[in-house]
Amino acid sequence: MTERARVLAWRLAILLVLVAAWEWLTGIKAIARTPGLYWIDPFFISRPSAIARRFAYLASGNARLTLWQMALSTIQSTLWGFLVGVSTGFAAGLVLGRHDRLARIFDPYIVAFNSLPRIALVPLITMIFGFGLLAKIVLAWTIVFFIVFFNTFQGARSVDADLIHSARFLGGSDRQIMRTVIVPSALAWTFAALTPSISFALIGVVVGEFLGGESGGGLGYLIIQSLGTLNAADMMVALISLGVIGIVMALGIKQLERRLLRWRPEYRGRA
C-alpha cells in the first residue's frame, strides 16, 4: 500500500468512527428513566441518519428549492467574487509593489479601508446592490481583494534584485523582466493566499445570503430557514455541503498551483 493510500485509509477510518459515535451517542439516553435526555441531544445537532434522509429529500425534485439549486447559487457567487478579488488584488499588489511613490500615496487609504470589519459593510452593500448575485460578489470581493493584495505586494517587493540586474545585463526589456522574473516571483506569494481567500469568499457569500433570504438563495438561506423552524437536520445538511464545497475548491487551487508553479523545487518532481 502506498503512502497516499494509507493516508486516505486513515482519513476514512476517522470519519467512520466519528459518524458512528455521533449516531450512537445521539440515540442513547443518558438516564434511562428520564425522557428526552441523551448523551448528545439530537435536537441541537440532529443525527447522521436523519441528516441523510433530509439530504435525500432536499436533493430530490420534491423540494420547492432543491439543494443543488442552493449549492449552485453559493458556488457561483463564491467563484465570481473570488476571481474578481484575485485578479484586482494581484494587479494592484503588483503595481504598488513595484512603484514606491504610489505605494506611499495610497497606503493610508488601503489601511483605512482594510481596517473596516467586513460585516459592517454588509448593510451598505445590500442597500446599494440589493440582495441578489451582485451584492454577494461585491461582499466576497471586499474580503479576497486585500488578502491577495498584501501577499502580492510583499512578493513584488521581495524579488531578488540580483535576478533583475542579471536579466537587464542579458538585454531583457522592462516588459520581459516583469513577465519572466517579477510576476513568477510574486505568484508564489499570491498562491499562498488563495486557499484562505476561497474560504473567506465562501464566508462572505454565506453572510450575504443570511440577509438576502430566498431572493438571495444559496445555502446561507437554508441555514437561516432551518434556524427559524428549529430544524437541526437541514442546518447540518447546509453546513456539511459548505464543508464539501470548501474542500473541493481548495483542492482545485492546489492543482492549479502545481501547474503554474511547476518550476518551484517542491513541485518539480510532481510535474
Image (cartoon, helix red, strand yellow):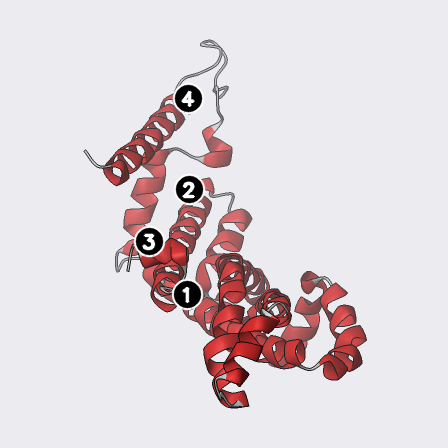
From the viewer's perspective, tell me whether residue 130 is left or right of residue 107.
Answer: left
- Residues at marks 1 and 3, CA–CA distance in whole angstroms: 17 Å
- Comparing 8 with 173, the one in front is 173
Q: Quadrant of residue 106?
A: bottom right
The relative height of residue 92 versus residue 32 in the rendered view (above or below) is: below
User: Which is nearer the N-term, disc 4 or disc 2?
Assistant: 4
User: Which is nearer the N-term, disc 4 or disc 3?
Assistant: 4
User: Please, what is the three-letter code of the amino acid marked with disc 4?
Assistant: Leu
**Tag 1 and tag 3, C-beta contact below 8 Å:** no
Give the residue number, with chain letter if any, for mark 3: 58
Disc assigned to residue 233: 2
At x 51%, y 34%, the residue is 44
User: Which is nearer the N-term, disc 2 or disc 1?
Assistant: 1
Q: Considering the numbered disc 4 on the image, is that residue within a helix, a strand or a loop?
A: helix
Q: Quadrant of residue 127?
A: bottom right
Give the residue number, with chain letter if any, for mark 4: 25
Give the residue number, with chain letter if any, for mark 1: 75
At x 44%, y 69%, the residue is 79
User: Please, what is the three-letter code of the amino acid marked with disc 1?
Assistant: Ile
* Number of numbered labels in the structure image: 4
- In the picture, which quadrant includes the C terminus? bottom left
User: Which is nearer the N-term, disc 1 or disc 4?
Assistant: 4
User: Please, what is the three-letter code of the amino acid marked with disc 2?
Assistant: Ala
Q: Nearer the viewer, mark 1 or mark 4?
A: 1
User: Please, what is the three-letter code of the amino acid marked with disc 3?
Assistant: Leu
- Residues at marks 2 and 3, CA–CA distance in whole angstroms: 11 Å
From the viewer's perspective, tell me whether residue 51 is left or right of residue 81.
Answer: left
